[in-house]
Image (cartoon, grey):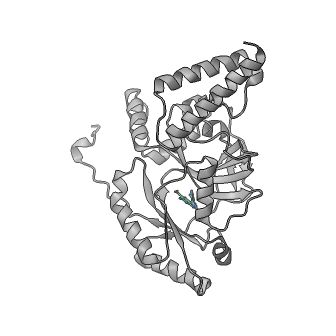
Amino acid sequence: MDLKEIEKKIEDLRKTINQHNYSYYVLDQPTITDQEYDELMRELIQLEEQYPQFQTPDSPTQKVGGQPLPYFEKVEHKVPLLSLGNAYNEQDLYEFDRRVRQVADNQEVRYMVELKIDGLAVSLTYENGLFVMGATRGDGTTGEDITQNLKTIRSLPLRLNEPVTIEVRGEAYLPKKEFERINRIREERGEPLFANPRNAAAGSLRQLDPKIAAERGLDIFLYGIGTIEGKELSSHSEGLNYLEQLGFKVNKERRLFTNIDDVISFVKEWTTKRPTLPYEIDGMVIKVDSYPLQRALGFTAKSPRWAIAYKFPAEEVVTILEDIEVNV
Ligand SMILES: CC(C)(C)c1nc(N2CCN(c3ncccn3)CC2)c2cc(C(N)=O)c(N)nc2n1
């Protein structure tokens, strides 16, 4: 094959593997066996090593993790990542609704309700559709650059379906099954166990060696847009649908409601359905859907007036006595 044909071969391999990644990790619909996938990856890694001039930043080979870093750079978020006010019972939700309707006057109020994924909040920056930087939320203003580790998340697109410049927010998390697998390995190695999937996700994303992060089966749901160039959106629900169009993984259990009573019954439904999820959630997030109404409601010192987190009551930790290793 001449160089032109080799470049074409590498490009075709890259597109095919990225398509399989999207089907498998974003749509949860595998399109080839792991065997076939590994074979394609092996071929692409080998060709890119032989012809480095044809390597591109969006190649799936970039997901296997590069060299360990000595430390993480600090990054300033262009738009601060806010906190969330908390609601602990129905009364708090009725109160939230009353405050929203005070400002909404007689306009229709729509609420988007989402599962509150129990992971680590991160910010992803894309320039002309290419993933260029990812950072932890940190204190909301300053985070840490963990781009290398975030690249290893299989469902995180390295190239979007449109060449947009956008900064998005989401929750990186560890599925329950991955958490149990990782702790089993740590137990065999006599290493300290992670207390819960959130700590395991944070610990994995703060690894300086991306090859360790790549072994950890991390995943991510995107839930917000920080900044976007050249696109006018009128509501949060429209924004989330647009993120899905771009190729991001957005949680499907979200729903729109026009009254707080339906929000409350949805929250109750998930309080009982929670154990059936393959990942942990620690509540629900209720957001005013309309961007103009969000702007009218504005923010308190650290959190929006147009959103609230409903926290599930902490699961009573029933420790079965015989399970406790009493080290005498
Ligand atoms: C954009 C807003 C502010 C409305 C917002 N903020 C969130 N969070 C803020 C507080 N965060 C935070 N994290 C650490 C310390 C303090 N606050 C953690 C993310 C959201 C978290 C989730 C989720 N987990 O699934 C979600 N579906 N939507 C969110 N929406």
Which residue appears at 64% of the width and 32% of the height?
15
Q: Nearer the viewer, residue 277 or 283?
A: 277
Residue 260: give x, y in percent of width and height.
Answer: 46, 77
Which residue appears at 40% of the width and 44% of the height?
176
Of the 4 image quadrants, the one containing the N terminus is: top right
In the orientation shown, which residue stands out farthest toward the top?
A: 1
Of the 4 image quadrants, the one containing the C terminus is: top left
Image check: 1 left or right of 32? right
Specify the quarter for ligand 1.
bottom right
Q: Nearer the viewer, residue 253 or 16?
A: 16
Image check: 88 left or right of 62? left
Residue 97: give x, y in percent of width and height.
Answer: 51, 79
Image check: 49 left or right of 236? right
Query: Does any portion of residue 210 appear in the rendered image?
Result: no
Which residue appears at 43% of the width and 48% of the height?
279
Q: How many discs mark residues in the rendered view?
A: 0
For residue 304, which quarter of the picture? bottom right
Q: Is residue 240 above or below residue 259?
A: above
Q: Is residue 121 above or below residue 328?
A: below
In the orientation shown, which residue stands out farthest toward the left?
A: 322
Q: Nearer the viewer, residue 308 or 192?
A: 308
Residue 213: give x, y in percent of width and height.
Answer: 56, 34
Which residue appears at 43% of the width and 38% of the height?
178
Query: Does any portion of residue 176 appear in the rendered image?
Result: yes
For residue 84, which quarter of the picture? bottom right
